[in-house]
Image (spheres, rainbow, N blue to C red):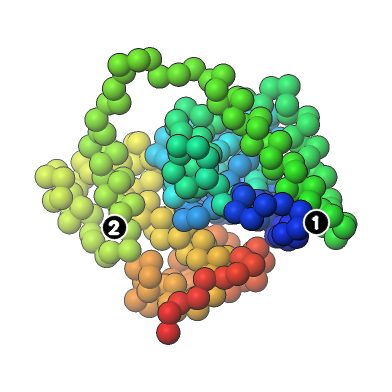
Amino acid sequence: MVHMHAVPPVPSSHYAEGLFRMTYLTNTEVDNNGKIRAIHSHADVAEIGLVYWGRGVHTIGGQQYHSEPGDLLIYNANVLHQDLADGDAPMRFFLCGVAGVQIADMTSGCIVKAPENYLLKSGEYFEFLRYGFEAIEYGLTNQQPHTSLFAHGFLYSLMAVISGLAKQASAIPAGAQASPPSLVEEMRRYIDRNYANNFSLDELAQVFHINRFYASHIFSEAFGASPMQYRTRRRIGEAQSLLTSSDFNITYIASVIGYDDPNRFSQVFTKMVGMSPSKYRELSVRSQQPFKRDK
């Protein structure tokens, strides 16, 4: 279940051009089957989540994080992520999209630098943050005046809280070096780069000089899905992003993510998401200025 709201732009007279702003707000309930949102990323929008009910398991940038009420989740732009409930009970969280993020020496769309800061404990700030999200949702739902200004101000408070919490988090010891990626992580990265290509499990295994059974086993153990299932999730996640942020037609979207047959794409999408691509687009928040394909 997702309640999505586009946040209207703040009048330019009220803030300096070029600063980041909240573009949408969702109040989402997820279970553990991944039907609400497949694994995906956003090219030019970062996201901030606040868990307020239940427990979740979140895959962000290839790592898993376990959340509980009060936890903040940070999704930098271009970082793959997916949110699921941890167990049979649902998990609920607010999520806002943030456009125009450019902080100090970090790359565009980056809110926090270190992966260990992708999940932060809000602690004493929890009630303030929850009430802020609830107030924005109420204002958007009831078309209250000046809601966009309130959302803009709240976002700056939220970013300040995140900055402070990230600084408090433990730093990586001086001289420490990241371990080289494992074989299964290399496989995941390969699929992330090539998900639109129609390679077989045998062909994937040949790339890494292992047999297909071992490839499937170690990947499923690490990520809870076979390599081909993971590729499907990546495809559907990308399709969901394109459906909500562009005006590309469904046939074009199918071809971009690797489906030559748009009917097959619609069948796979409907089975995974629980509704057709056209219905998903109809119910989703659309970008205020959708990207248009060059003619």
Looking at the image, tell me whether mark 1 or mark 2 is earlier in sequence order: 1
Q: Circle 1: is it few (<14), some (14-19), or many (20+) Cα within 10 Å?
A: many
Picture coordinates of residue 144, whole percent (x, y): 88, 57
Q: At 24% across and 30% down in the image, what residue appears?
A: 180
Q: Kindly report the distance in space between the C-alpha atoms of the residues bearing marks 1 and 2.
A: 39 Å
Callout 1: SS: helix
- Position of residue 281 relative to residue 44, above or below, is below
Judging depth in this view, the residue of 57 and 247 nearest the camera is 247
Check disc 2 and give the amino acid type: Asn
- Position of residue 74 relative to residue 167, above or below, is below
Picture coordinates of residue 258, whole percent (x, y): 34, 68
Q: At 44% across and 72% down in the image, what residue appears?
A: 253
- Say which residue label 1 marks: 140
Judging depth in this view, the residue of 154 and 88 nearest the camera is 154
Judging depth in this view, the residue of 135 and 162 nearest the camera is 162
Q: At 71% across and 36% down in the image, what residue appears?
A: 157
Do we see residue 275 in this rendering? no
Say if mark 1 contacts mark 2, CB within 8 Å.
Answer: no
Q: Quadrant of residue 194?
A: bottom left
- Viewed as shown, does residue 154 lie left or right of 258? right
Q: Quadrant of residue 107?
A: top left
Q: At 50% across and 55% down in the image, what residue appears?
A: 44
Q: Quadrant of the C terminus?
A: bottom left
Q: Quadrant of residue 94?
A: top right
Check disc 1 and give the amino acid type: Leu
- Say which residue label 2 marks: 194
- Position of residue 175 relative to residue 120, above or below, is above
